[in-house]
Image (cartoon, rainbow, N blue to C red):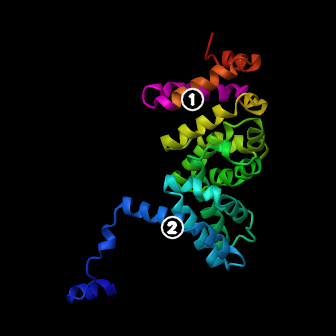
Amino acid sequence: QLQELAESHGQGPKDDPLDKDSEENVNKRRIGLIQSGVVAALKSLSRDASQTTSLQISKCFRLLSSEIAARGFIVQQGGLTLLMNKCGEKKSEEKICLDISSESQHAIAKTLVTTNPNLLTEAQRLGCVRPLLALCKDHKATNLMQFEALLSLANLSSTGLTVKQRIVDEKGIHAIHYLMFSDHNLVRRSATEVMLNLLPHEKVLNHMRNSENARLWVAFVGFLEEDKPTGLAALGAIAIASSDKEVAKSLTEAKVID
């Protein structure tokens, strides 16, 4: 209201050239900050930081990780480990504590979308599973947050059985299966791809032995025309799982195949 009043008297704010700043320039500044040692500076600030400062540190990492070229530096310079620790610092259900966790989880998700998981230590791969699944389970998380968390889980789960087992142990199958029903096609697709990557884990096979779940997977194959990647992921999952006699039986009992 004050702004409208000022503008009516010809005293409104002048156009700020920063308002027209391009994404390219923003990314250049992100890289400049990374190369100037911002990760080390943020790590130093995080020691004995107040909750307000901790929240801003987590936001900084989330914004820095939006630039693909910055993600490797964040991992190499200890930023990923710091974010993992921040996710484990939730001391209460106060809004600021929840916000710190959410910002840190999202920063981890963004960082790991394009990071080669084989370059991470096993402790890092396993330690990132819980915060990523927390985003998947958070009903307040945006589609973008859950999409990036699922992409990162798909990335991590491609490394072997230890990560798959951690996802299962953290009750990830139920959370990921739930997101296969998302209204957003990219969330549906990435959830389907994570489930595909988890095969042939026994718990996922057991999930597919349920005839109702078998029907769902075949229904997803029907997306081939309108959403080819989702349809192919579902088809791949059925191809792998149908080598299990009980899964094949559930498909038959569901009258999906003869």
Query: Which residue occupies 59% across, 40% down?
Result: 191
From this view, report whether residue 127 is shown above or below residue 47.
above
Q: Which residue is mark 2?
A: 33
Separation (CA) of disc 1 from disc 2:
39 Å
Q: Is label 2 in a helix, a strand or a loop?
A: helix
Residue 124, above or below 43: above
Q: Quadrant of the C terminus?
A: top right
Name the residue at 54% across, 25% down: 221
Q: Judging from the image, what secondary structure is the residue with disc 1 in?
A: helix
Between 125 and 130, the one nearer to me in the picture:
125
Look at the magenta stretch and give its main secondary structure: helix
- Residue 233 got which mark? 1
Q: Mark 2 or mark 1, which is nearer the start of the sequence?
A: 2
Foreground of the two, 37 or 238: 37
Report if residue 240 lies within the magenta region.
no
In this rendered view, identify the residue nearer to me: 24 or 258: 24
Instruction: Name the amino acid type tagged 2.
Output: Leu
Q: Is residue 207 left or right of residue 74?
A: right
Q: Which residues are magenta?
A: 208-229
Of badges 1 and 2, the one in the foreground is 2
Residue 250 appears at what percent x and percent y? 71, 20
Q: Is residue 232 left or right of residue 258?
A: left
